[in-house]
Amino acid sequence: MAAVGIHAIQKSFGSTDVLKSIDLAIEDGEFMTLVGPSGCGKSTLLRIIAGLEAQDAGSISIGGKAVDDRRPSARNLAMVFQSYALYPHLTVGQNIAVPLRMRNLSMTERLPLVGRLSPKAAGKKVEIDRQVRRVAEQLDIAHLLDRKPKQLSGGQRQRVAVGRAMVRDPNVFLMDEPLSNLDAKLRVHMRTEIADLHRSLGTTFIYVTHDQAEAMTMSSRIAVMMEGDLIQVAPPAEVYDDPADIRVAEFIGSPKINILSGIVTNQGTVGCNGVEIGIQPDCPAGAEVKLGVRPEKLEIAGPAPGRLTAEIRHLENLGPDMLVHLRMRDEADPIVARCPAENLRTARVGDQVGLVFSPGDVLVFDGTTGLRQPSRFAVPAPEKIHA
Ligand SMILES: Nc1ncnc2c1ncn2[C@@H]1O[C@H](COP(=O)(O)OP(=O)(O)O)[C@@H](O)[C@H]1O
Ligand SMILES: [Mg+2]
């Protein structure tokens, strides 16, 4: 087990700055997820931690010691890739044993004949088999040890790849989108397995994904990366409820957060689609702001004066809940509300409805920089404004 320190790491490919000075302290035993859109630099950062890629500047430490001049094999990390990279001609048992054979047997001891004749090599092989079986039992694949990879399902292959990483007993697990080759249902199941594995091993995990749902469900903390920068590092709930930047708010959460355009009024409140919203951001009158409201914080009501109105375009029944897709005049983007289905029995496509939300549920972002703006509720703060 070990903490991992990422200190001012920079990397360019040609004229592209892929990592623009990344700092991140990952605690011993933590499950840290690097999440961000495709191409933002996640794999590059993971490969630099592993020593598979050299940084242009900055330093990586493991267990408090700089490892920049250590080869990948000397860093005591194990990496699980998206393509499991199993050897097709080896059995499951042999695949899992590969790292142990490389580490514990000499070149000659690995030869079949010498291996059988030398008692020392035979002893080492018994020990390797024992370790392979122990890991296979932990992952519930002991009954598959004699099969070849092509005789396995996607989920089983994924477990073999994890087994091959575990058998080395690494200080840190690095995982680069390990679930992205699996179908949707299995992916959700494997999230639980990986989270369980982390709990039982207690080892530091650094997990890379572009899938915000994976990041939200498994991690102790998530680090949101965009265009080579870390924008926010926090526990999942905090990133969701308290995003530091509009890009984080829009990336985390499904369906996506609703964003409305507003202007700060002379009274300090916000005008939005001709309606005054009872929040007071720390911005001067006339400033452009963006208002973020999560779909589950929007309620559908009848249209009323002083209330935002929108037209129902589509109703998506999720069983207990309904996703109401709306279009608001003067807003380019559609609006989505997630409501209990029982509240919407009479709603029909084409209806004009009012939108109701509490000022405490509105996130305010600077219209230019996208940074979160502290804001107060207009005094006196009503329990629920009918905006
Ligand atoms: N070896 C390389 N040579 C040139 N460009 C690269 C190389 N590796 C990655 N890149 C570029 O760096 C950027 C970040 O890539 P990557 O770290 O793979 O992103 P992610 O894993 O977040 O999708 C991309 O624009 C990618 O094209
Ligand atoms: Mg990648």
Image (cartoon, helix red, strand yellow):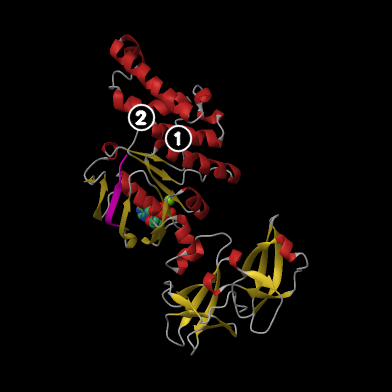
Membership of 5 in magenta stretch = yes
Q: Main secondary structure of the magenta part?
A: strand
* Separation of marks 1 and 2 at Cα, in angstroms: 11 Å
**Residue 290 falls left or right of residue 69:** right
The residue wearing badge 2 is: 99
Picture coordinates of residue 136, whole percent (x, y) = 46, 27
- Numbered badge on residue 161: 1
Number of numbered discs visible in the structure rendering: 2
Instruction: State the SS at label 2.
Output: helix
The residue drawn where x is 46% and y is 87% is 286
Task: For ligand 1, give the image quadrant.
Answer: bottom left
* Between discs 1 and 2, the one toward the N terminus: 2
The residue drawn where x is 70% and y is 71% is 312
Magenta residues (range): 1-10
The residue drawn where x is 46% and y is 46% is 177
- Crowding at dot 1, Cα within 10 Å, few <14 / some 14-19 / many 20+, comes out as many
Q: Is residue 140 above or below residue 325?
A: above
Amino acid type at circle 2 is: Pro
Instruction: State the SS at label 1.
Output: helix
**Residue 107 falls left or right of residue 129:** left
Quadrant of the drawing holding the C terminus: bottom right
Residue with the most extreme bottom position: 266
Amino acid type at circle 1 is: Ala
Residue 366 in view:
no
Tell which of 304 and 188 is nearer to you: 304
Query: Residue 1 appears in which quarter of the rendering?
Result: top left
